[in-house]
Amino acid sequence: MTDRDDDERPETPEPPAAAAAPAEPAPSGARSEAASPSGRRPSRPNLLAEKIAVSRDHAGYAFRLEPSDLANLRELPGARGKTDEELGAEFLETQRDRLVAALAGDLPAPAAVRVLVDPYSRQVFLAHEDRIRGIVSF
């Protein structure tokens, strides 16, 4: 048995003084990682605009324009100065009755419908699951 109690822990040797002190001070303009408020490197800002889909419900159908189709709306006259989301919302609002009429006989409501835009032929293709269910000229 030893003279130590079970509660005591053995002492660990201290590191040498040379290892505890930094060799050179950092230049005045440089910041170390530890100098940031959270102790982590600051993250870089995300410069890419996050694009989201636009959807509108009408007569039991959920019409959805994906970001790639929103970008196609930019090719249409009158798109200047509007965001993709504004273009998509405006397009779905103005064309909603025509879109519903194109689907009425083929696809029972309620259904989720993707709206694919071809700005050059000025047509939209209405897709449900993996099939085109209607085509509308605008």
Image: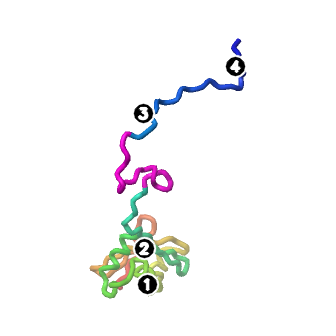
Query: Which is more toward the observer, 70 or 137?
Result: 70
Where does residue 95 sit, x and y in percent of width and height? 43, 85
> Pointer 3: what residue?
18
Could you classify mark 2 by the number of other residues whose Cα lies within 10 Å: few (under 14), some (14-19), or many (20 or more)? many
Q: Which mark is residue 46?
A: none
Mark 1 vs mark 4: which is more N-terminal? 4
Give the label, 2 or 3, closer to the camera.
3
Give the label, 4 or 2, closer to the camera.
4
Give the label, 1 or 4, closer to the camera.
4
Kind of residue sitting beneath label 2: Leu
Kind of residue sitting beneath label 1: Glu
Residue at the spot 46% in from the left edge and 78% down from the top edge: 103
Where does residue 36 sit, x and y in percent of width and height? 46, 55
The magenta stretch is: 23-41
Could you classify mark 4 by the number of other residues whose Cα lies within 10 Å: few (under 14), some (14-19), or many (20 or more)? few
Secondary structure state at the residue bearing disc 1: helix
Secondary structure state at the residue bearing disc 3: helix
Q: How many marks?
A: 4
Could you classify mark 1 by the number of other residues whose Cα lies within 10 Å: few (under 14), some (14-19), or many (20 or more)? few
Mark 1 vs mark 3: which is more N-terminal? 3
Where does residue 19 sit, x and y in percent of width and height? 43, 34
- Whole-Å distance between the Cαs marked 1 and 4? 81 Å
Residue at the spot 43% in from the left edge and 56% down from the top edge: 42
Kind of residue sitting beneath label 4: Arg
> Pointer 2: what residue?
65
Could you classify mark 3 by the number of other residues whose Cα lies within 10 Å: few (under 14), some (14-19), or many (20 or more)? few
